[in-house]
Image (tube, grey):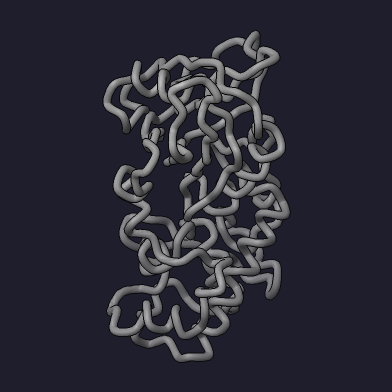
Amino acid sequence: MPELPEVETVRRGLNQLTLDQKITGGDVLLERTIAYPFSVGEFVAKIKGSSITTWHRRGKYLLAELAPSPTPPLSPSSTWLGVHLRMTGQLLWLHQDEPLHKHTRVRLFFGEQQELRFVDQRTFGQMWWVPPGVAVESIITGLAKLAVDPFSPEFTVEYLALKLQNRRRPIKTALLDQSVVAGLGNIYADEALFKSGVLPETLCTDLQLEHIKSLRTAIIEVLAASIEAGGTTFSNFLNVKGINGNYGGVAWVYNRAGEPCRVCSGLIQRTRLAGRSSHFCPQCQR
């Protein structure tokens, strides 16, 4: 599943390629991809004629602010296009003559024969159109449940300590909870725990303040490093130009079970917590 670095990589690419270009139309090949409005025809009609002012990211969600069509009737305010890639979603900027991938779900057409193509093998990804004057969270309800972003000023040691206190569950499981840290997933939770020297099975109630300080710093550093590398590609992730991410080649522990630790040369181990794989170094993490 694309996590914060992958979604941020896509956001930056979209801001380079799609801004201030009019959406001339669209084609929905899988109706359930459109979560709102419930009419596919209305979705296409509402976005047609708009242009994208900018792309934002909240957690793992992408939000495009749409400028209204210059033709009457004029909207009193901006509308929004929301996208969640879920497990296997890809947003690709392509020429309209490019052959359709069999997992293409939605096509948004722009000028000069360009299109933004939503490809999604597992079909869990979703798109929303949010009307003007309506709170985005009331339509894309998952946004209301998100914690603060790791790169926001609100993501302090005090904030993280408050979120983790009194939780009698493993820290790895807690970090995957989007109401604790927005955008963090399996890959970067493993990476951050390694860098902070904390074992994934450690209960939140057993963490000392020094651990939480190290963990906060590690989360930010790991996410920033992956964004710099263009994200991680282990299976499906591609950026908007169809290029793989490069972080996987320098990962500390994730997907490296049985390989030597990059720090101590001991073997990386893998366990399962709440049905998810967790990778760690038993010598570097305590």
Residue 83 in view of the camera: no
Residue 69: % across, % down: 52, 25
x then y, percent, for residue 211: 51, 85
**Residue at coordinates 40% horizontally, 73% vertically from top-left?**
171
Q: Nearer the viewer, residue 254 or 124?
A: 124
Q: Nearer the viewer, residue 272 or 216?
A: 216
Q: Position of residue 71 (x, y in %)?
A: 52, 20
Looking at the image, which is closer to me, 73 or 219?
A: 73
Residue 244, quarter of picture: top right
**Residue depicted at 60% across the width and 49% down the height:** 8
User: Which residue appears at 66% of the width and 54% of the height?
Assistant: 227
Q: Residue at x 52, y 79 (%)?
A: 156
Classify residue 235 as left or right of residue 111. Answer: left
**In the picture shown, does residue 88 fall above or below 114?**
below
Quadrant in the rendering for residue 196: bottom right
Q: Percent from the top left, x then y, of residue 261?
A: 65, 67
